[in-house]
């Protein structure tokens, strides 16, 4: 796929309930969305880094900087891109796993959409993909019993974001 442009969008979403952990309380989610624009389709990736470097060394402003100044120049230098070629091109950059994953997911999503395939429909993806995740238990001061919710895989578990809205092309590459 020939990558025409990449758009970075910062979005803020209010949380339904405060998210309390040992490193603080959040009432909204600030996210960096990456839109990869190709000739046949657009793809989206979401960076899961938080606004402050409290849980991880990666945080939204630093991810924005790393993506713009270090990752995207390597991706655009490839010419034709695939998720695998993006992974290989970004491998020399140390760390920044969340930023790299967001860029690679956007490229993969665009490539798949151009072929008329959704990432969620890939049987091979569902069977071969291992998602490592941890649980951050809250430090709530309320005297209520902890609530247990089962983990169910969803598109957000792999850092994907899809927008069913109309396509618009930014003029910035």
Image (spheres, rainbow, N blue to C red):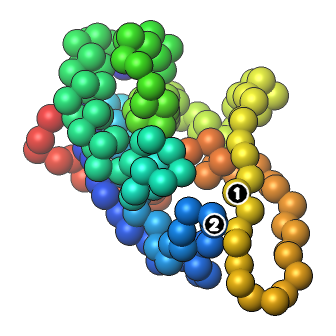
Q: Earlier in the sequence, mark 1 or mark 2?
A: 2
Q: Is residue 44 left or right of residue 166?
A: right
Residue at image position (42%, 50%) is: 53
Please give the residue where the numbered disc 2 appears in the rendered image: 21
Residue at image position (41%, 19%) is: 94
- Quarter of the image where one finds residue 151: bottom right
Residue at image position (60%, 72%) is: 19
Q: Please, is residue 150 above or below residue 8 in the view?
A: below
How far across and how far down the image is residue 45, in percent? 45, 42
Work out whether residue 85 or residue 22 is closer to the camera in this orientation and state it. 22
- In the rendered view of the protein, which quadrant contains the C terminus? top left
Secondary element at tag 2: strand
How far across and how far down the image is residue 67, in percent? 29, 34
Q: Are marks 1 and 2 in contact (CB under 8 Å)?
A: yes
How far across and how far down the image is residue 56, in percent? 51, 45
How far across and how far down the image is residue 129, in percent? 73, 28
Residue at image position (50%, 14%) is: 84
Q: Is residue 34 left or right of residue 172?
A: right
Work out whether residue 90 or residue 141 is closer to the camera in this orientation and state it. 141
Can residue 84 be seen by looking at this rendering?
A: yes
Please give the residue where the numbered disc 1 appears in the rendered image: 136
Give the number of the disc on residue 8. none
Work out whether residue 126 or residue 65 is closer to the camera in this orientation and state it. 65
Q: Residue furthest bottom?
A: 143
Give neighbour class at mark 1: few <14, some 14-19, many 20+ (Cα, 10 Å).
few
Q: Is residue 73 left or right of residue 95?
A: left
Secondary element at tag 1: loop
Can residue 44 be seen by looking at this rendering?
A: no
- In the rendered view of the protein, which quadrant contains the N terminus? top left
- Quarter of the image where one finds residue 38: top left
């Amino acid at each position: 796929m020939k990558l025409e442009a990449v758009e970075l969008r910062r979005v803020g979403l209010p949380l339904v309930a405060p998210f309390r952990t040992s490193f603080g309380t959040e009432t909204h989610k600030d996210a960096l969305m990456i839109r990869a624009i190709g000739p046949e389709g657009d793809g989206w990736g979401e960076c899961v880094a938080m606004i402050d470097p409290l849980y991880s060394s990666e945080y939204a402003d630093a991810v924005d900087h790393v993506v713009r100044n270090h990752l995207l120049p390597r991706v655009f230098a490839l010419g034709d891109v695939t998720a695998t070629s993006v992974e290989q091109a970004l491998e020399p950059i140390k760390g920044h796993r969340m930023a790299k994953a967001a860029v690679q997911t956007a490229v993969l999503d665009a490539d798949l959409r151009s072929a008329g395939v959704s990432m969620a429909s890939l049987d091979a993806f569902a069977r071969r993909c291992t998602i490592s995740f941890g649980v951050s238990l809250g430090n709530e001061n309320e005297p209520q019993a902890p609530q247990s919710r089962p983990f169910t895989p969803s598109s957000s578990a792999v850092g994907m974001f899809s927008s069913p809205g109309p396509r618009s092309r930014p003029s910035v590459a």
